[in-house]
Image: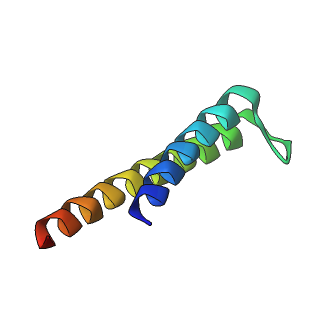
Amino acid sequence: MNWLSLITGFFYIVLGVVIIIYKFFFVTLDPTIAYVLGVIMMAYGVFRIFRAIAKIKASRDEE
């Protein structure tokens, strides 16, 4: 399950980059909103990756 969270984090980062570049997320976005939404998506992706890494390390320490 932790590996899935890690992969999901990478997808959030990619989605954030795509939103910033194409300024589209189901509807065409204003450039400012696209930038803010893209940054939020990328930050959440980084958060998920760090949390997944911490859980993977913790599970290895328990073994």
Give residue 30's position: percent from left, percent from top: 78, 38
Vertical placement of residue 35 versus 40, above or below: above
Task: Look at 56% across and 47% down and name the residue there.
Answer: 12
Vertical placement of residue 60 versus 9, above or below: below
Give residue 43's position: percent from left, percent from top: 46, 48
Q: Residue extending furthest right?
A: 27
User: Looking at the figure, which quarter contains the N terminus?
Assistant: bottom left
How many marks the image carries: the answer is 0
Question: Toward the viewer: 36 or 55?
Answer: 55
Quarter of the image for residue 34 reads top right
Q: Residue extending furthest top?
A: 21
Task: Look at 19% across and 67% down and name the residue there.
Answer: 58
Left of 18 or right of it: where is 41? left
Left of 60 or right of it: where is 34? right
Give residue 33's position: percent from left, percent from top: 69, 43
Task: Look at 22% across and 68% down and name the residue there.
Answer: 59
Give residue 41's position: percent from left, percent from top: 56, 49
Task: Look at 12% across and 66% down and name the residue there.
Answer: 61
User: Looking at the figure, which quarter contains the C terminus?
Assistant: bottom left
Q: Residue extending furthest bottom?
A: 62
The scheme the figure's colours follow is rainbow
Question: Toward the viewer: 24 or 4?
Answer: 4
Quarter of the image for residue 20 reads top right
Quarter of the image for residue 47 reads bottom left
Question: Toward the viewer: 25 or 56?
Answer: 56
Left of 34 or right of it: where is 12? left
